[in-house]
Image (cartoon, coloured by chain):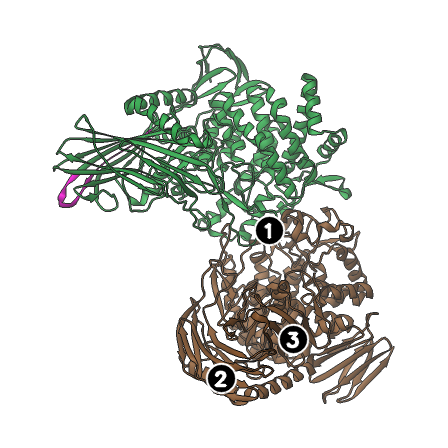
Chain colours: A green, B brown
């Protein structure tokens, strides 16, 4: 862990250039707008270590799977997030010397990610040959207003000399993915066009045939005056460039404006891409950099209005939480129901795919509480659209009759993961997808979703569970053998409590949704019953499974057993382990991890978080007290669940300790892997820790519930939530809870067990 | 399965050329002599599908491991058996037309592997352009007398024309392995030399730096008269060739004799290789083809004298068992204690490595009973020499203080397998290595081995078991969690009965060996105690583990449970499974296999085979009746154990059924994979089925025991065994058992429970 970023409430700031940190910074300072994302690569050439990354949402490549030993059922392909055409490139030569921060002396380097306004800025002074000093300032953003456009203002000021600047402004589609399994290039050339004013590169992915057309225009302003120029035109396969020169005068600023648009065949007819791209580029040019910047600022202000969290008295915590909210909003906007939230967002290639159960278990609550319900709804519709693929996926594993197994990792609904213990056995993911439907309807009260999309998915998943269990006559119970639970430090176990419970819960919920539809919309139900071919004996079987599901439990300890045989392990607490063993995943062989008691992430406790009301405080306490001390939290998704439960149990110190584990995960490069990209999905977990943990937010029986408490380290904190038309700003100090309703809808709620009401545009103050 | 080979008692015969069978034949017709092996590739060019394979024992390459997902503890390299310099190559051109069986019409094709005399012969008539017919006869062998030499007699007779023959006789070291992980070539050029008479190619493996020097000379005989020729010399990187021409006369035979020697730096000083190689080549030349052929015949007659099995009344069975004995004798001769028995012998590249637990569990009994005890002893010494590496291997997995875990697959003692569920968890292999020591001493009575080598290995393995178990206080028992038993269709199970039992047995045996040494050679014991640092509290711990080891058992069924929770599975018999599902490993995804009850190979029953005397017939019967019906025998190592136990239990039909499963595995390409090479180690299992199964051979308390019974399908069978100086030829019909002692030592034995004695050079006849 290396802390090198400056604390600031609204910005991420790096002062001084250290090449050792550069790849981490490239991840942290990434910009994105849901349609595209861009790592904080330099515009000018850089020959030091770098991970170049320009990503287009939903554009992927099915890279041939690489395994040591093939097993039946493995997917043939692993969907990769694609590094795409470099649209930021500006080659900068001064008096014939190439500006490359790997080769020149750099001083007064400052890099800033301004989260409030949504831009990346960088300033430095480079010392060239013969002591020539040049000051560079560059500012760029991808617009959240004009989604297909990114723009750069690149300024060059010679401090102690006159000279000549040569700029080559280019688009380069000849790029690679560092994680390509077979060192293959994923993009084919389609077309290039270049005129004095414009350039475009059109490329197409192999196999998937996504077409990406990038267009660009470059403008030049010298000493405040726009300069026209006759560029040298460069055109190669997958590459166009405009090269032009400008005299530099000491102390005078020369500014290059680069506008680029990136349009894809996902959104437009492939044959029209150049036309569409030129139009969107032209629209941006008409606005100009400053107007676009102003619109960007305003749009971000609107986002913050709905989703900000303010922490007083702890700048590090404030910066951490805003960074997380910022990255989530950069990654997914909910406007396109074909998209989802990759584990690294737009900040790196690693993990491929775009969708894990992270989305349902961790990200959904963030979007539910901070944005229009349609955004969360689109995350659900995404899975609905993949139902057929999930049924095919289950068929490949021997299931039938409409049983659906959603993939562990996917881009297009097909499985692309290939570790048997995860791909085939970590089936609890199916439960999280069912739970998300419950979660969405419970929060929004949008029951229309159930008849429109929800039941199809619930029935598919229920059918999977009903086929996956087996009846053990000797015990008159249903069991589920050979699974991997959320705690991936156990593989191929029998009767993982969480999986058994979420399976039976799915059956219960599916039956209750069927009952609800029968009562409220009999026609729709009948149509669905026909379409899905639901028969009475099938649902009777579900009832039987629910009644006879086996749940491992230890009477003496009063805890659910994570799986059969858990108590045969040597039960050791993490605190009693010599530190040299941690993290286990870097120090222990896999078998040693597996036979140990140590837990990677919440498993039984994940169930107690999801199905919170099923368990009394005594049960939650016993299970928390039993499992948490054996948990190593080597998944970034683990601490948030523990933090929330600790809050509920009144374990203040533990709650804050767990909160700190992920709050600044990437800013402090806690896991030493941020160079690969940010841990985007776990950022939602940090938000959950604040809002559901410290804020105690729940919705039960259409009631909004808050149970806030404030960590001793903080003076106050406040968060915003949207809830059924209300926009609540909840401020918590150690003396008062103040709830301001910024919308018009009167909202009843329960705070620490007492019922209140906040009128529209009114404030409720509660003293402790 | 495709039966295309002709039945014959002493030869494998293929009539007619079908390119579809060629790669299978290349495996089946392989020749070898323990030092080197050669697939039945054609001498002349062949552009059809072929797997070229020329292998040098003990010469390997550590190919960089390929995995999908890396886990701590995986080995960096996978040791590959290397395809080496092609020494058989003869390019044959007739009137300018290249002889290539892929492109010409072939008739009267006969390929014969003569097992009695140890050679490969091939005859065919090829029709060339303009209807020219040429008859080819080629015969070759690798000498089991002059181990480094292989020789070829290649005869060309034009049947209906006069013409010109051009021959290019070459050595080609520029070869590849088809299973290279990264398409790398493993051999580097060292030197080539070529004179009018001789040629040599010296190559060196990358990383391991094994040097191989191949030398060759070619002689020409036309119409019975030796012809001298002035060849064109060809010299390229890793390649030398001699090209020469000869007029062909209709009906007259032209014969090319090619002699090649292959010497390696494993056996000789690398700097002397050319010299040594030329010497061994010259010695062969001095003998000439016919003399070498005569010596080969005689040497094979000696081998058959000790190891033959004769089956009357069933040519297919006769051919099958001789093929297996022949291949085992071609693969391992026991002269070099650095070598071992690869799962494909010298017949293919697949599986890499050379040593699996197959050696101890299946191959050792064959060599014990059919060869001088020093050969079996060398198989044990091989593991002794790898003890340090086994200790290092265990250290990598977190064990300490001299605990040894032998690798799953190895060439040089280092692990080279990388599936976590096998590499890290299939630790029962350690037990088989301990058991082999018991087995060797029990059979040979060579107790000197224990003090010299045995105890070191036993203590290392015992230490591993003592650290690998964990004490469960609540049950006051020791358990072993997270293992894979011999049945690889279960992974990461708790308390695999076989593993628990073989572990405790190892501790028992180690303690008994220590007691034996204390009593018989106190000085040696004291020295070993010091060297191995054996302390009293360590052995007390072993005693405690033995006493408190947990063995899963079901009272009601009276069977040991393969592992915890086995009875929670749906228990189905293989016969009740729709055939479309079989073999499971080609039709089911891994999770489905794992959670099913189906068993790949003997597991509990493997224990009952090894520790046969520990269990009464009732127990064996119950366990056999319970497990066998759930066993799919998808390992070629499975049927033999079942066959032997079925014989003991008097299940005649089952015994014969199991015998048939592997008796002709490769000859009939039963598993459809013989093109990759023969299943060499499972051939030993077939031998075991006959000798230990139908012959009922056991050695208990220094008593040789026989309990023969004859399958109804056979008229008689006889097998030979060596036992403590005796060479017994045991002939069984359905009326008599006749035992001829071909050596001088009087041998007591027990047949069907009655004590007898066979005097030297005498025959004992027993009527049923």
- Disc 1 to disc 2, how far (Cα)? 47 Å
Instruction: Identify the residue at image location x=13%, y=45%.
Output: A130
As helix, strand or loop, the secondary structure at mark 3 comes to: strand
Q: Nearer the viewer, mark 1 or mark 3?
A: 3
Q: Nearer the viewer, residue A135 or B445?
A: A135
Q: Is residue A123 magenta?
A: yes
User: Which is more N-terminal, label 2 or label 3?
Assistant: 3
Identify the residue under disc 2.
Answer: B281
Identify the residue under disc 3.
Answer: B113
What x and y, as percent, mark residue A219?
A: 25, 29
Q: Nearer the viewer, residue B159 or B99?
A: B159
Residue numbers of the magenta segment = A119-133
Kindly tell me whether residue A557 is visible in this rendering: no
On the same chain, marks 3 and 2? The answer is yes
As helix, strand or loop, the secondary structure at mark 1 comes to: loop
Whether residue A550 is situated above or below residue B322 in the rendered picture: above
What x and y, as percent, mark residue B369?
A: 69, 77
Kindly tell me whether residue B311 is visible in this rendering: yes
Identify the residue under disc 1.
Answer: A71
């Amino acid at each position: 862990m290396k802390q090198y970023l400056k604390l600031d409430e609204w910005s991420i700031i790096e002062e001084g250039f250290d090449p050792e940190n550069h790849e981490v910074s490239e991840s942290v300072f990434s910009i994105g707008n849901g349609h595209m994302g861009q790592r904080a690569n330099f515009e000018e050439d850089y020959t030091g270590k770098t991970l170049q990354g320009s990503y287009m949402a939903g554009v992927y490549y099915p890279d041939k799977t690489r395994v040591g030993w093939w097993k039946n059922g493995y997917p043939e392909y692993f969907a990769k997030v694609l590094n795409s055409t470099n649209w930021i490139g500006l080659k900068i030569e001064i008096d014939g010397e190439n500006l490359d921060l790997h080769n020149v002396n750099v001083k007064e380097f400052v890099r800033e990610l301004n989260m409030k306004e949504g831009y990346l800025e960088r300033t430095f002074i480079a010392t060239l040959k013969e002591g020539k000093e040049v000051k560079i300032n560059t500012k760029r953003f991808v617009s959240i207003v004009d989604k297909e456009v990114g723009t750069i203002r690149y300024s060059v000021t010679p401090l102690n000399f006159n000279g000549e600047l040569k700029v080559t402004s280019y688009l380069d589609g000849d790029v690679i993915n560092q994680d390509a399994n077979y060192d293959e290039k994923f993009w084919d050339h389609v077309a290039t066009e270049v005129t004095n004013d414009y350039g475009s590169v059109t490329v197409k992915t192999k196999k998937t045939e996504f077409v990406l057309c990038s267009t660009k225009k470059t403008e030049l302003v010298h000493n405040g005056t726009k300069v026209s120029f006759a560029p040298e035109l460069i055109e190669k396969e997958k590459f166009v460039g405009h090269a032009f020169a400008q005299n530099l005068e000491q102390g005078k600023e020369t500014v290059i404006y680069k506008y680029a648009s990136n349009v894809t065949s996902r959104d437009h007819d492939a044959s029209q891409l150049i036309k569409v791209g030129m139009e969107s580029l032209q629209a941006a040019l008409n606005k100009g950099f400053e107007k676009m910047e102003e619109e960007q600022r305003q749009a971000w202000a609107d986002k913050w209005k709905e989703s900000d969290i303010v922490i007083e008295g702890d700048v590090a915590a404030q910066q951490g939480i805003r960074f997380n909210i910022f990255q989530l909003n950069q990654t997914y906007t909910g406007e396109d129901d074909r998209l989802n939230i990759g584990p690294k967002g737009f900040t790196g290639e690693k993990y491929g795919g775009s969708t894990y159960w992270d989305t349902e278990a961790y990200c959904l609550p963030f979007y539910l509480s901070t944005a229009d319900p349609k955004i969360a709804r689109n995350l659900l519709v995404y899975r609905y659209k993949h139902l057929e693929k999930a049924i095919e996926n289950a068929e490949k594993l021997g299931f039938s009759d409409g049983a659906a197994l959603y993939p562990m990792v996917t881009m297009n609904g097909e499985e692309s993961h290939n570790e048997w213990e995860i791909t085939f056995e970590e089936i609890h993911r199916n439960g999280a997808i069912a739970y998300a439907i419950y979660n969405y309807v419970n929060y929004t009260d949008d029951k229309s979703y159930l008849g429109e999309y929800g039941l199809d998915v619930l029935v598919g998943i229920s059918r999977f569970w009903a086929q996956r269990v087996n009846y053990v006559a000797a015990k008159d119970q249903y069991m589920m053998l050979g699974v991997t639970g959320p705690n991936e430090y156990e593989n191929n176990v029998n009767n993982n409590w969480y999986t058994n419970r979420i399976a039976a819960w799915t059956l219960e919920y599916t039956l209750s949704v069927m009952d609800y539809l029968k009562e409220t919309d009999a026609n729709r139900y009948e149509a669905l019953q026909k379409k899905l071919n639901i028969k009475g004996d099938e649902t009777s079987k579900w009832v039987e499974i629910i009644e006879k599901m086996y749940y491992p439990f230890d009477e003496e300890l009063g805890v659910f057993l994570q799986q059969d045989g858990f108590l045969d392990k040597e039960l050791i607490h993490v605190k009693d382990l010599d530190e040299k063993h941690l993290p286990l995943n870097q120090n222990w062989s896999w078998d040693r991890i597996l036979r140990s008691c140590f837990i990677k992430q919440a498993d039984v406790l994940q169930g107690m978080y999801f199905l919170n009301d099923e368990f009394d405080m005594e049960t939650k306490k016993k299970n928390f007290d039993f499992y948490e001390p054996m948990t190593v939290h080597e998944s970034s998704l683990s601490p948030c669940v523990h933090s929330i439960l600790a809050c509920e149990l009144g374990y203040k110190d533990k709650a804050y300790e767990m909160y700190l584990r992920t709050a600044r995960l990437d800013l402090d490069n806690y896991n030493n892997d941020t160079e690969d990209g940010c841990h985007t999905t776990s950022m939602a977990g940090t938000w959950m820790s604040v809002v559901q943990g410290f804020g105690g937010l729940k919705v039960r029986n259409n009631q909004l519930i808050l149970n806030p408490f404030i960590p001793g380290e903080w003076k106050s904190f406040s968060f915003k939530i949207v809830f059924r038309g209300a926009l609540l700003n909840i401020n918590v100090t150690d003396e008062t809870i103040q709830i301001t309703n910024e919308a018009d809808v009167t909202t009843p709620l329960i705070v620490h067990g007492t019922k209140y009401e906040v009128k529209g545009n009114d404030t409720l103050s509660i003293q402790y």
